Image (spheres, rainbow, N blue to C red):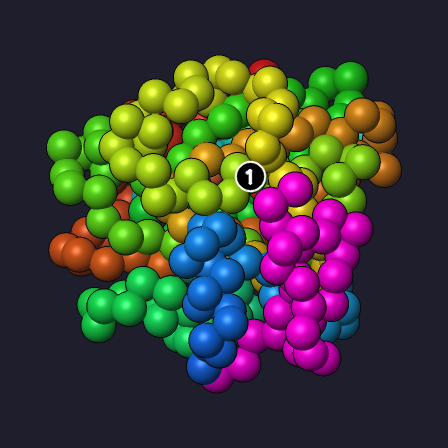
Amino acid sequence: MELNGVAAKNGTHKKSLNNYPEFTLGDVLSHEQKEFFEKNGFIHFKNFISRETVDTLLREAEKIQDEWVSQGYKMINGVPIKYGTDITGKRIVQRFAFLNQHSPLFSDLLKDQRLKALFDFIGTDDCRIGETEKDGLVFNHYINTEESNYSQLGWHTDALRDVFYGQKILPMLNVGIHLDTSTTDNGGLRLIPGTHNQGLRTLLFKKFYFLSHKPDKNEIGLNVEPGDLTVHDGRLWHRVARSPFIGEKSRRRVMYVPIITGKFTPRTENSKPLFYQRLISLTNK
Ligand SMILES: O=C(O)CCC(=O)C(=O)O
Ligand SMILES: [Fe+2]
């Protein structure tokens, strides 16, 4: 694999099973981190938050989930909420949007100074964390049960939404904060390194958006532990593979927040779902 050539040189990162280097996020990006990201369109930072913080966030999300379930909310700022069923039969939220607007624990997390260091992957001075734009802080909860229909997500890029807006594709990053261990033998994020740099034709037509789930010969899987942070370029092709297991072993929870540029376009209670937001909620059966 091409990535094998990028070997660990010093103590700041080590090799993982999948053979891509892992890094540590500080207050500024290193030259090596920028170079890796520019070439591959993704990067993996270990231990962004502690296991204790992960546990606290999981408990907080569960509290918010129980409230949303009991109130029967359908959308947050016009973004459809995805509901499902846990292995115990309990009704759960499988995709939250704008979670940062529902608890200070989540809004404070987005204030972490180290997240600002990531702006340098874009390099313009209008970068910001999408606290009130796009889908805000998203929380995805995948689990395979008899009844869960949210256990995978087809091939897509996150930049597609700008195409539907008729806008120029603006630089954008998607920052993942992982809350469960996810190894490549248990489904999880698959991405195709380098596809962020291959032009509009690749961005639009490499795969059938959200409908195609077929493994790609160049895809790589991530191996993450709770508290790890990953970043991928908005133009990078990726999917979420279904875990081959049923039940607890298949559980995978991960949060995403975008780093965006361009015109400030906040969403409010009166916002309507955008095409891509409907697509996500319709296609992951
Ligand atoms: O769950 C993941 O790791 C990725 C989710 C994703 O690609 C998305 O929500 O756009
Ligand atoms: Fe995505």
What residue lies at 28% left-to-right and 36% top-to-bottom? 199
Q: Residue furthest bottom?
A: 27
Q: Is residue 10 magenta?
A: yes
Residue 284 visible in the shown view: no
| Front in this rendered view, residue 271 or 168 | 168
| Front in this rendered view, residue 76 or 183 | 183
Where residue 165 sits: x, y (%)?
Answer: 18, 34
Quarter of the picture containing the N terminus is top right
What residue lies at 55% left-to-right and 47% top-to-bottom? 139
- Place residue 15 in its image quadrant: bottom right
What residue lies at 63% left-to-right and 55% top-to-bottom? 5
Mark 1 nearby-residue class (10 Å; few <14, some 14–19, many ≥20)? many
Q: Which residues are magenta?
A: 1-27
Q: Which residue is mark 1?
A: 191
Q: Is residue 148 toward the left or the right of residue 112 in the image? A: right
Where residue 13 sits: x, y (%)?
Answer: 68, 71
Q: Is residue 266 toward the left or the right of residue 106 in the image? A: left
| Front in this rendered view, residue 104 or 70 | 104
Where disc 1 sits, the SS reads strand
Q: Residue furthest front?
A: 5
Reply above or below: 223 against 199: below
Amino acid tagged 1: Leu
What residue lies at 15% left-to-right and 41% top-to-bottom? 168
Residue 15 visible in the shown view: yes
Where residue 158 sits: x, y (%)?
Answer: 39, 39
